[in-house]
Amino acid sequence: MATTASGLRADGTIGTSHRRVILASSVGTVFEWYDFYLYGSLAAIIGKQFFTGLNETSQFIFALLAFAAGFAVRPFGAIVFGRLGDLIGRKYTFLITIIIMGTSTFLVGVLPGYSTMGVLAPVLLIALRLLQGLALGGEYGGAATYVAEHAPAGKRGLYTSFIQITATFGLFLSLLVILGTRLGLGTESFEAWGWRIPFLLSAILVGVSVYIRMQLQESPLFKQMKAEGKQSKAPLTEAFGQWKNLRLVILALLGATAGQAVVWYTGQFYSLYFLTQSLKIDGTTANLLIAAALLIGTPFFVFFGWLSDKVGRKPVVLAGCLLAALTLFPIFKGLTHFGNPAIEAAAATAPVVVTADPNACSFQFDPVGKKTFTSSCDVAKSVLAKKGVPYTNAAAPAGTLATVKIGDEVIESFEGAGLAKADFTAKSKDFTGKVTAQVKTAGYPEKADPTQSNYPMLIVLLAILVLYVTMVYGPIAAWLVEMFPTRIRYTSMSLPYHIGNGWFGGFVPTIGFMLVAWKGDIYYGLWYPVVVALMTVVIGLFFVRETKDVPLDH
């Protein structure tokens, strides 16, 4: 049967060869997401390997910042590779991004740690993360545009939803490889050197991916546009220098991708960090729980992509944002209840309160490890943060020595400013010992007790979070592709997607845990995704148009 310039049969269906092309594009993207997610899944271990010059809390936060650095540069990758994609085509851009991503990931696996290279180690690590982010910034827009330009009218949500699955499959694959390596080597060997193996395996995956990408043909709509001489000569100027197009980019960001991003990263990343860092569930168990939830939820990417072809992109995406904003707090409190009920019980029977002069309390984040926090308030909060003990704050008059109240017991902190190092160490050890003994007496656990965890209920709650992810993420590619004309589509859709996901979404774990460390409330970090999701609901509802029936050849 004859096909049209867009690669469709006369009856409007898509040909077998183009299904194969779409599948090949999706498989390559899975491997690229695998590379990117490895770092996020191993952030705690990487913090110990590359940021050993910092205290325990700053180690983890700075490891998350290095993870977020890859997200921070994604919009720049979107600009660079989006322009290339609109000028020279989708296929060649694919090849460049996968090679950069795979090579950077492999090099992380052979990079010496802080103990060997000193400060150069984290600098090189962050440089490799930046390269990964640049490559991923050029990947998604090309994949989404490529698939959408092959899809028949009325099925773009369905077809592009397979691209949306690739991110979850990439995460799922990375978790499986990490779990297999951890179980095979044992926790001690894995944390010492075995964590490098998943990164080194990317050499094999990048070879497979490059081979797959070499088999791709150029997008038929791009070839047709080029043949007709309608190609943009300056896609950046046209996309961002003309208000009619720039306005669409801004609305796509604030009214679609920002909320989608925070819901996605809360459901798939922040939840993992919450299980391991706040609830003290061991890493293997937490990864298995997330993997189970992903296995349950993943088919819904396709379902909600298909549904968006029927009812529209807006209703599905905005409903997911609204549901998440309304239920994140009770869901995460449920994770505590079923994951580590001892924390919940201890907080109810023996709440911890830090009473201190607010002006003496610092925002304890020191990325270079040079600053010391010696006020009585900082000393008290530092000890509690390291132990993962939730607490509330109470104001005291200026000059008052900070105290920690655990149940009915009050422990006085000490003022470390001006003390000799040996004296500070001795007093700190004494104070820490008193707090440790009292929180143990009050029932605060050092680790989650597996016999007290309700794993089926944890999977149910995590699966609900993944369901929200599928609602917001399944239709988003089709929605973005349909907003912009072919001549600047790659450039225009890539930037709002990667600002949304790279900045709004990528910083969810970092901002969340910095807020928790600041306030002491283990749920306080959820305010960030809740507020952003609600913003997207309002802007998307009133200012962003529905696009499901818009033709792509415009």
Image (cartoon, grey):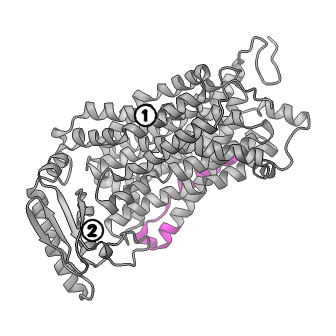
Q: Secondary structure at mark 2?
A: helix
Mark on residue 382? 2
Q: Horizontal and vertical percent for residue 504?
A: 52, 51
Question: Where is residue 387, by image quadrant?
Answer: bottom left
Q: Is residue 28 above or below residue 351?
A: above
Quadrant the N terminus occupies? top right
Quadrant (top left/top right/bottom left/bottom right) for the C terminus? top right
Report the span colored magenta: 96-123
- Where disc 1 sits, the SS reads helix
Q: CA distance from mark 2 to mark 1?
A: 35 Å
Query: Relative to the observer, which residue lies in front, 292 or 23?
Result: 292
Q: Is residue 117 above or below residue 303?
A: below
Q: Check the image and report above or below for 357 versus 84.
A: below
Location of residue 457 (image quadrant): top left
Q: Give 35 or 483, whichever is nearer the viewer.
A: 483
Q: Is residue 156 left or right of residue 426?
A: right
The mark found on residue 323 in the picture is: 1
Q: Decide: marks 2, 1 in contact (CB < 8 A)?
A: no
Q: Is residue 420 visible?
A: yes
